Amino acid sequence: MAISDAALMMAWKEVLAMCNLKAGEQLTILTSDDSNQQIAGMARLAAADMGAVVTNLNLAPMNGEKAISRDKSGYIGKTALEHNKAALACLKASDFVIDTLQLLFSKEQEEILKTGARMLLAVEPPEIMLRMLPKPEDKARVLAGAKKLGVAKKMTVTSKAGTDFECDLGQYPVLTQYGLADEPGRWDHWPSCFVATWPTEKTANGTIVIEEGDILLPMKMYARSPVTFTVENGYVTKIDGGFDAEFLRRFMDSFDDPEAYAMAHVGWGLHTRAHWTVLGLTNPEAQLGMDARSFAGNFLFSTGPNTEAGGTRDVPCHLDIPLRNCSLSLDGEAMTKDGKVVPAEQR
Ligand SMILES: O=c1ccc(O)c[nH]1
């Protein structure tokens, strides 16, 4: 269902206030030709109404001829900023960047954040953004999970379907996503609510079984048959199964880059207003799939880049695969059990 301009403008004011936007701050709205103009337009009105000094920066789309998926996550990390010093300078001079283009996993994003700029990605449809408007309790849930993840030495994930995966932790920082860029240098994505980190290099090992109904991103498909990932020393070495397995293999192979098979962020979903079913109820091409990445209790694993964690792996192939019915533990303490979040008081 559509969202009115007024509702979206008010939501932007609420979110920017939670991001501590102050009058006089320099706020840049980054767009490309395929940005959602309602999101960008209502952000501009909201920020201006809050007294921010607003700049609209529009960059030409790119990678259209390189990507085989139209999804923004289908080919990541290479942006028009690579050769655009003026635009990069504008973003680095900003206190706050609203990104409707998707700089995620680009080295330029890390450069901009290092200046202390806050950056909020906003590429989901407005109705999904409003249903998952960030709330303080989302942030509290994510930070509680991050506190555990930040000191854990080992993550283990199992499932009745046969997942038996583990990795050491500690080399990379914790990724917290609760939909607000509320601290200097912080990036976030409205909407999202999950916690993750990257396995210490070469320590991810085991088997990950994708069951029928688990979600394959950026394909935006529900798996229709089991797929088994074999992970050895931090890399996916085998992908076995039927059609879905072949589809994943062929997509990854099309990038012709062995780094595409590296394990990337691993963690679990914490959003109580995200739904596993949304991908089947809405136009897959019109969303990034943040319900899938964020629904409470998922085990979200990914492959490919680690630039967001300060690494140098910038391969444009990035899978995000949220699984249901998994049990994720940190140093033996259960965070999820059979796809349900274990409440802190029951740990
Ligand atoms: O918000 C996002 C989206 C994709 C991803 O891989 C991480 N966070």
Image (spheres, grey):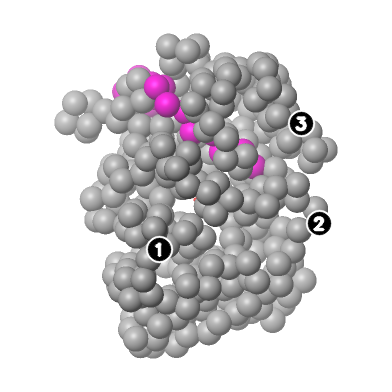
Secondary element under disc 3, as helix, strand or loop, is helix
Residue 185 x, y percent position in the rendering: 47, 64
Q: Quadrant of residue 229?
A: top right
Q: Quadrant of residue 264?
A: top right
- Label 2 near label 1: C-beta < 8 Å? no
Q: Separation of disc 3 and disc 1 at Cα? A: 36 Å
Residue that badge 1 annotates: 2
The residue under label 2 is which amino acid type? Glu
Which badge, 3 or 1, comes first in the chain's sequence? 1
Q: Is residue 332 magenta?
A: yes
Which badge, 1 or 2, comes first in the chain's sequence? 1
Q: Is residue 242 magenta?
A: no
Residue 321 x, y percent position in the rendering: 54, 34
Q: Is residue 71 left or right of residue 155?
A: right
Secondary element under disc 2, as helix, strand or loop, is loop
**Residue depicted at x 40% and y 55%:** 128
Residue that badge 3 annotates: 250
Q: Is residue 299 left or right of residue 242?
A: left
Segment colored magenta = 318-335
Q: Separation of disc 2 and disc 3 at Cα? A: 18 Å
Crowdedness near tag 3: few (<14), some (14–19) or many (≥20) residues, C-alpha within 10 Å? few
Q: Can residue 20 be seen in this snapshot?
A: no
